[in-house]
Image (cartoon, grey):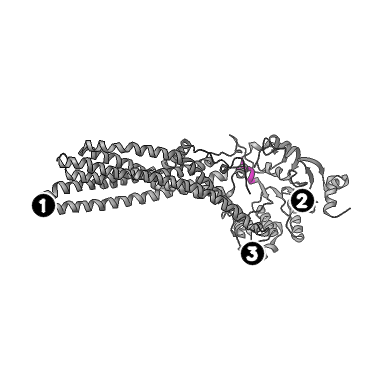
Amino acid sequence: MHASRDDDSQDPKEKINYKATFRMLTGLIVPERRGFMAAFAWLLLSTAFTLFSPIIAKYIIDTAIPSKNIRLLVMVVGGLFLNSLLFMGFNYLLQMRLIKTGQQIMTDLKKRMLSRMLALDLPFYSEYPVGRLTARVQADTGSLYELFTETTVTIFRDILMFIVTFCVMFYFSPRLTLILSSVFPFAIALSFIFLRKSASLFVTVRKLASEISGFLTEHLNAIALLQAFNREKMAAEKLEAINKKKFDAELSGELMMIVFYLSVILLSPVAIAIILGVGGGWAIDRTISIGTLVMFILYIDKLFEPVFRLSEHISIIQRSFAAGHRIQRIMERRPAIVDGPAPRYIHSIREGIEFRNVWMRYADDSPWVLKDISFKLPKGKSLAIVGETGGGKTTVTNLLFRFYTPQKGKILIDGVNLSDIGLNSLRTAIGLVHQDIYLFPGTIMQNLKLMDEAIPDSMVHDAIKTIGLEAFFKHHGLNKHIVEKGVNLSAGEKQVISLARAMVLNQEVLVLDEATSHIDPHTERLINTAMRRLLSSRTMIVIAHRLSTILNADNILLVSEGEIKESGTHSQLLAKGGIYSKFYKLQFGEN
């Protein structure tokens, strides 16, 4: 379906830009710093209470039990129970704050991503299919949510827990603590090896997940075509192949993580054996107390719990940074076409539009699509552009709307270079009825307003009356619901709605790009009559294959192979007996 040299799914060896991604993630955290500060406050309290339990246990064994004071024992055990309740309460507050803060970050990030994607120009969408962009907004932000709600604060807690636990153990028995430290280099070495080996695997998994999402979006949109040509099995086989690649990559990553986890978890019984072996001998010699030994054993879980969770943290961090890297690639994109430092704003077109020696191609290594195109379109006049498919007709309108910028030449409106006019101002003055029609899910009235409820209903009714389509919209009520892409309407009906939609905004210049290709003859006559009435106040550009729709145009350009081969009125071009005359006779069956 879609392919591109710059599609990030094509480079399995791509590395994560950790510096740029970390900078982006930090930028997401800063606006929600108050939420994270509150979370850290609950974190400190919950960590303090969980670390206090082994000290209470030591006091019970070394002091409360030997004293044979039942009342003291009950009080200390009650304190241990209360300590556990307080830990649970503060941990609950911590989790709720993280969830709320994480949801807010994800909501803001999705808004920013959508805002950036809407600002980008058409070349961007030729590189990134819609399915992969959907995966960025949904799946990749989901990976970051896990980072913000679990990993970020948990890592800080684990570091804090490790340091405090080590310090408490060192305070009660420096010698035994230093002996236990001998196992830490093995944990660090295992973590480093796992980090290096797993990085590329997690990037590959994220890419393949995005590719699956894009594949599903593209093929489900083309389901009618696939069924018409019996290509369901082929599509299923392709999806199975992509799923197999993702399965293999994900399985390798998970196996690597399991091996790492099992290797690290072996350190716990080794540490307990050291405590019981070395510390037990010291307890026999009364060098340390039994309570201290029990406290050390209880602290083993607190000491090695951060190490045990290291594999999980690394896995989440790798996935999150892979997702963040992909999001960053979109967020760092800048539109190729932007307003200048002092854009001009046009409120009305006084003179007209001029193309002056315009050359255009879509890539530096591709052939010219337009070659030295020059014409003038005075205000209130109509210009028709005809020619064979791929001749460059639609490129003219793409340049007029500044979807692309010509490599050579100028496009002028009232003598002002198009690049000096603000984009919003330009596209407010010019309306477009495109050959690729998209209707939003909603009512016909909502679609005629372009889903903008600020537009009054009266403007819609005036546009329908002006274009002479009252009968059509009586048959298709304005409250009729349109499903996604307007699949419950015919192609002709969608074009009528699209044409009426362009009329609603009452723009001075109207561009019709194959806007009447699927309209029946009766509706076509109504539209052509309305167009003739509008010529006194509208400037019109009509791109058409059906020459019957442009017979009354003030000027006709025949564009072929990117060049203007002929120009003139319909009668003048017929009289020349050139390419236009041949097109006309071929279309209408004349010898």
Q: Is residue 381 above or below residue 367?
A: below
Q: Which residues are magenta?
A: 422-428
* Mark 1 residue type: Asn
* Mark 2 residue type: His
Q: Quick check: 83 left or right of 557?
A: left
Tell me residue 527's x, y (percent). Answer: 74, 56
Badge 2 vs badge 3, beta-carbon distance below 8 Å = no
Query: Reading the chain from its start, which is encountered first: label 2 or label 3?
Result: 3
Q: Magenta includes 83?
A: no
Which residue has dot 2 on it? 545
Q: Nearer the viewer, residue 495 or 193?
A: 193
Q: Determine if residue 520 is in view.
A: yes
Residue that sits furthest to the left in the current view = 68
Q: Residue at x 82, y 42 (%)?
A: 566
Q: Determine if residue 44 is in view.
A: no
Which residue has dot 3 on it? 477
Tell me residue 461's x, y (percent). Answer: 65, 59
Q: Quick check: 440 left or right of 283?
A: right
Query: Reading the chain from its start, which is encountered first: label 3 or label 1?
Result: 1
Query: Which secondary structure class fits the magenta region best?
Result: helix
Residue 362, disc: none
C-alpha distance separating marks 3 and 1: 88 Å
Q: Quick check: 338 left or right of 247?
A: right
C-alpha distance separating marks 2 and 3: 30 Å
Residue 69, disc: 1
* Mark 3 residue type: Gly
Badge 3 vs badge 1, beta-carbon distance below 8 Å = no
C-alpha distance separating marks 2 and 1: 102 Å
Secondary structure of the residue carrying tag 3 is loop
Q: Nearer the viewer, residue 283 or 57?
A: 283
- Residue 156's quadrant in the figure? top left
Q: Residue at x 53, y 39 (%)?
A: 14
